[in-house]
Image: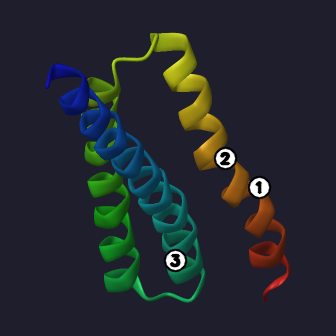
Amino acid sequence: MKRDNRHWRVLAGNIELFLGCYFVSFGFLAALFFLRRDKLNFALLSAVGSLAGVLLVMRARRMLGWHRWFFWLVMLLMILAPIAWYITALIRLR
């Protein structure tokens, strides 16, 4: 029974890590987009979404129980990959 509990805990941790990184990266990109468009309320809402993503990432860190360096490496790659992918389009959009 303990092994089955660990399985669901790892599954929930991976889902929270994915969603948290998604909220952080795209919240950051949306905040940049709305700041360039002078829509400060939407930029603030996007920043709040990024902070909610950080909370999910921190909870996932505790749930997964991975080594610290491995978790931070995976998390940084999951956050920086979409930002690097879409930042060029955001910069070109004027």
Image location (x, y in percent) of residue 73: 61, 25
The residue positioned farthest toward the front in the image shown: 1
First in residue order: circle 3 vs circle 2: 3
In what element is the residue under mark 1? Answer: helix
- Judging by the rendered image, the residue that carries numbered circle 3 is 35
Q: Label for residue 67? A: none
In what element is the residue under mark 2? Answer: helix
Three-letter code, disc 1: Ala
Relative to residue 78, is residue 59 drawn left or right?
A: left
Quadrant the C terminus occupies: bottom right
User: In front here: 86 or 78?
Assistant: 78
Three-letter code, disc 3: Leu
* Picture residue at 32% right of the left edge, 72% below the top: 44
Q: Label for residue 80? A: 2
Q: How many marks?
A: 3
Relative to residue 89, is residue 80 drawn left or right?
A: left
* Picture residue at 31% right of the left edge, 33% below the top: 7
- Judging by the rendered image, the residue that carries numbered circle 1 is 84
